[in-house]
Amino acid sequence: MAPAIASLETVEAKSEAANAAAMARSDMYAVFGDQELKPGHYLWRDVPEEAGAERVVVSLSDQLAYLYRGNELMAVSTVSSGKTSTPTPTGIFNVLEKKPMHRSRKYDNAPMPFMQRIDRFGVALHAGHLPGRPASHGCVRLPSQFAAKLFKTTPVGTPVLIGA
């Protein structure tokens, strides 16, 4: 397996991530139908491990995260990404570190359950408050149950594509 890259925030990577987010919306309708998710909700289906490696796609415009196993959409969840003053970066990242419970060194020791760090500045996927809009300091907050399942499913090195 190739070594994980810390992040790729080039124009090409941002474009690839945006395209992945747009495709994920179509996949969601094909797999789960025309369901609208309310803040804090998610959909999950079992996809066999043989389908391939996992990847996460985040759509900032839709405030949704998608989990794929190979080419199969496995799950979709609402998120709360970074607010305008502390935006979530876009591009292609990898899960660099995982901790079942982490506390922010930057933001008043804030809890970050099921933390999966994706960059060297502390941006991570983790369980947190979901008000239905961007509200974090740059992290991608997830519903607690979804974050726990995602944590168990994705190994260090898992690609995370974040599109605007």
Image (cartoon, rainbow, N blue to C red):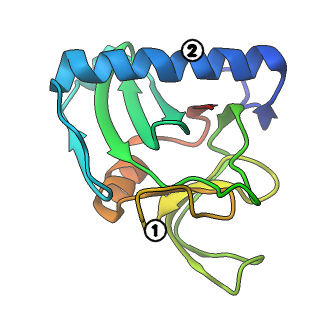
Whole-Å distance between the Cαs marked 2 and 1? Answer: 26 Å
Image coords of residue 148 (percent x, y):
35, 58
Q: Is residue 87 left or right of residue 98?
A: right
Q: Is residue 137 left or right of residue 144?
A: right
Dot 2 alpha-carbon crowd within 10 angstroms: few under 14, some 14 to 19, many 20 or more: some
Image coords of residue 126 (percent x, y):
51, 60
Corner quadrant of residue 74: top left
Circle 2 is placed at which residue position? Answer: 19
Residue nearest the viewer, comparing 69 with 63: 63
Under mark 1, the amino acid is Gly
Q: Is residue 76 left or right of residue 116?
A: left
Residue nearest the viewer, comparing 11 with 55: 11
Q: Taking 73 as reference, is 36 above or below it? A: below
Q: Which mark sits nearer the N-terminus, 2 or 1?
A: 2
Circle 1 is placed at which residue position? Answer: 128
Q: Taking 81 as reference, is 43 above or below it? A: above
Residue nearest the viewer, comparing 159 with 11: 11
State the SS at label 1. loop
Q: Quadrant of the N terminus?
A: top right
Image coords of residue 17 (percent x, y):
62, 22
Q: Taking 103 as reference, is 147 above or below it? A: above
What residue is shown at x 35% (from left), y 64% (from top)? 144
